[in-house]
Image: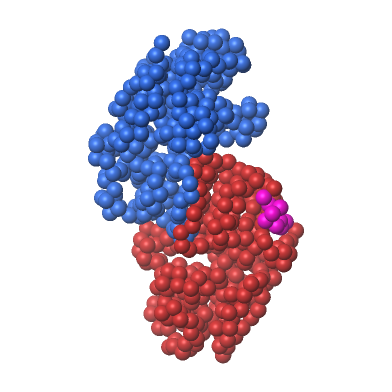
Chain colours: A red, B blue
Amino acid sequence: MKALRVIKSDLELAEVGVPAKGDECLVRVTKSGICNTDLEIINGYAGFEGTIGHEFVGVVEESADLPEMIGKRVVGEINVGCNKCALCKSGDSRHCAERTVLGILGRDGCHAEFLTLPARNLLEVPDQISDYEAIFAEPLAAAYGITEQVEISPDTRVAVIGDGKLGILCAWSLALESKRLILIGKHRDKLRIAENENVESVTLENALKLKRSFDVVVEASGSESGFETALDLLRPRGKLVLKSTFHGKSKWEAWRIVVDEITIIGSRCGIFSPALNLLKDKKVDVEKLISEEFLLHDSIKAIEKAREKGVMKVVLSMDR
Amino acid sequence: MKALRVIKSDLELAEVGVPAKGDECLVRVTKSGICNTDLEIINGYAGFEGTIGHEFVGVVEESADLPEMIGKRVVGEINVGCNKCALCKSGDSRHCAERTVLGILGRDGCHAEFLTLPARNLLEVPDQISDYEAIFAEPLAAAYGITEQVEISPDTRVAVIGDGKLGILCAWSLALESKRLILIGKHRDKLRIAENENVESVTLENALKLKRSFDVVVEASGSESGFETALDLLRPRGKLVLKSTFHGKSKWEAWRIVVDEITIIGSRCGIFSPALNLLKDKKVDVEKLISEEFLLHDSIKAIEKAREKGVMKVVLSMDR
């Protein structure tokens, strides 16, 4: 099968064998989405080698443990735990110390014709959700997962910084909880895509007039300046949700956190089922975020496209 | 009266008038404690000019609003709010945007013969508490205030980093809540002072064998390396309480916060009454932390002493 792989810092579309399923399910991938994390991995983040990609929809072809899964259309939680530790036994493998992560850590990903995942990681996709919507289950879960960590009520004043895909998904999903949310970005074209009846958008320069007024600020711009803007916008004792994994060492003024008693909350993966419910009920129009679609055999070009300025989600469709 | 003042970056023991009380209380200071924040202010932090010092015990000499306060032995909450905003009306002026802070922000402090504070800031000191103990009300409130922000139960695994005065006060007071607390420091002499039946101490090199095992880590060392150690020690989804206000821009690896979904909680001032209860009930032996006592007229020497390596709390006694 074809697979988009990073080997020794080189990206290549390789011809490899269909993965052995072992006691996992074999999934034929239908479509996958290119995430900024894929681009970071290509740039060397975390030293991952193998097939990249962690946003997908597919169909189960083989399942030893659960034959009733065969033929189902599925998405998959990306963290695969040891299934033995206390965390895994509580049903949440996201922080299992032994975990592998689809296309990110110790496990081949989804920009390929096939992948394997344990049956417990797979969720059937309701008929109301298109394949194009389903590939957003993972990033939407990551965005809406903020509500697992921070209480957001209709009166909570929320600012989301960053008008990329993740920022917009955060804004859309959190605006279902807060009636006082704004999205802050630098790109008027992206902000226009983001705006809906719940989400008001503001350019960065106008946002800075709103200093010290937000209960919760979500930093999803992936930049050091975004972090400083977040501190400017928060009220004392406000909460800063750190969503983007910018690498290398950044500078920060720790004393500001202490004096204003700010809480910073690191936020990575969410759980899928609430996100699938949002998609099923058409609460968020994720298809608006798709910029372009490529066939898997053009996936090198697709990555180049995903790197272009102004491009949002690039989708891979598996050619067969 | 004599007052220890910072004027245009110079420290001087000045002769100034007794402050006009206005609608506040006039307090004759009995003893005061030198805090590391005093040393930072002398070094130019926050551009404060005036009389420094914010840890004191004294006796009320004049009180227009509450004559029954006259003659009482008191300590004082250091944040003075506007008394009009929502925060102040809720009884908590610590984050009032218009606040002044004793000896730190817009208000003369306590290394002087007299100070003024509003009656609402003053708390009578129970007879069981000595003057030497009473000057620890402020730093002990700051340490024990962590329990206002983070739930600490007997089973919570807590590490406190930093064997200075603040770190030790954090360790002593939090060990009244957690039965699984360790104090981490570099100085065996200080760690020996800190150890008691609740607090086990560990040197830094031994602490690093305990990576990823703590629910809560309190960073009270005031150093960048302390922050990195804290990240090393925390379990995924653990809580890092940031207690010390190191200035300037530090470097940090924001992605670690995101991947392990760490929560960082800035923590500044606590409320006094729980701290006074700890002192009254002899739950913490704060007098062990006193290194030396000076008369106010020797306060320049006292500051030099406080700067010396290995010196803990330096006390000023007001000469009259």
Would residue B127 be counted in the magenta stretch?
no
Question: As displayed, is residue A30 above or below residue B171?
Answer: below
Q: Quadrant for residue B155, please give it.
A: top left
Seen at 45% across and 28% down, the residue is B11
Q: What x and y, as percent, mark residue B42?
A: 45, 33
Seen from the viewer's position, the closer of residues A276 and B208 is B208
Seen at 62% across and 48% down, the residue is A233
Seen at 42% across and 51% down, the residue is B238
Q: What x and y, as percent, mark residue B141?
A: 44, 30
- Specify whether B197 is left or right of A180: left
Q: What x and y, as percent, mark residue A32?
A: 56, 77
- Specify whether A289 is left or right of A46: right
Query: Which residues make up the magenta segment?
Result: A198-208
| On-image quarter of the C terminus of chain A | bottom right
Is residue A225 shown to the viewer in this render? yes
- Specify whether B236 is left or right of B92: left
Seen at 58% across and 79% down, the residue is A304
How many numbered circles does the render carry? 0
- Specify whether A195 is left or right of A156: right
Is residue B151 shown to the viewer in this render? no
Question: As displayed, is residue A114 above or below residue A310?
Answer: below
Q: What x and y, as percent, mark residue A270?
A: 53, 61
Question: As displayed, is residue A138 above or below residue B145?
Answer: below
Seen from the viewer's position, the closer of residues B166 and B274 is B166
Seen from the viewer's position, the closer of residues A147 and B95 is B95
Question: As displayed, is residue B276 above or below residue A180?
Answer: above
